[in-house]
Image (spheres, rainbow, N blue to C red):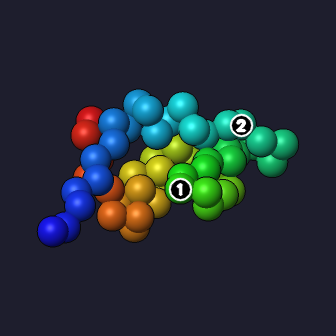
């Protein structure tokens, strides 16, 4: 049986914290990402197998 993971985009946004370089530090499933734009969050979550709900 396959597990389907879903996430609300707004909830994922709450995990993005502004950093000193003018971008954001985003953490998902224990992995830390340095991103420039919060729009990158969707791609990262999809790479983790999530279906994003907007």
Name the element at disc 1.
Answer: loop
Residue at the image point whose x is 60% and y is 40% from the top: 16
- Residue 2 in the image: state x and y as whole percent: 19, 67
In this rendering, the label closer to the viewer, 1 or 2: 1
Do tag 1 and tag 2 residues touch (Cβ < 8 Å)? no
Name the element at disc 2.
Answer: strand
- Most extreme residue toward the front, as rendered? 1
Is residue 45 something one can see in this rendering?
Answer: yes
The mark tally for this picture is 2
Q: Is residue 33 above or below residue 1?
A: above
Residue for badge 1: 29
Quarter of image, res 7 = top left
Residue at the image point whose x is 33% and y is 64% from the top: 49
Residue 34 versus residue 32: which sits nearer the camera? Answer: 32
- Residue 1 in the image: state x and y as whole percent: 15, 68
Residue at the image point whose x is 44% and y is 32% from the top: 11
Q: Is residue 51 above or below residue 7?
A: below
Left or right: where 37 falls relative to 47: right
- Most extreme residue toward the right, as rendered? 20
Residue at the image point whose x is 53% and y is 56% from the top: 29
Residue 54 versus residue 30: which sits nearer the camera? Answer: 30
Label 1: few (<14), some or many (≥20) within 10 Å?
Answer: few
Kindly identify which numbered label has been placed on residue 20: none
Label 2: few (<14), some or many (≥20) within 10 Å?
Answer: some
Is residue 43 something one can see in this rendering?
Answer: no
Measured in 3D between alpha carbons, the distance from the residue under mark 1 to the one under mark 2, in whole angstroms, is 19 Å
Left or right: where 25 falls relative to 50: right
- Tell me which numbered mark, 1 or 2, is placed earlier along the sequence: 2
Residue for badge 2: 18
């Amino acid at each position: 049986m396959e597990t389907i993971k879903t996430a609300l985009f707004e909830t994922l946004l709450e995990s993005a914290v502004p950093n000193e370089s003018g971008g954001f530090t985003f953490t998902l499933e224990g992995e830390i990402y340095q991103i420039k734009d919060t729009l990158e969050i969707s791609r990262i979550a999809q790479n983790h197998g999530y279906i994003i709900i907007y």
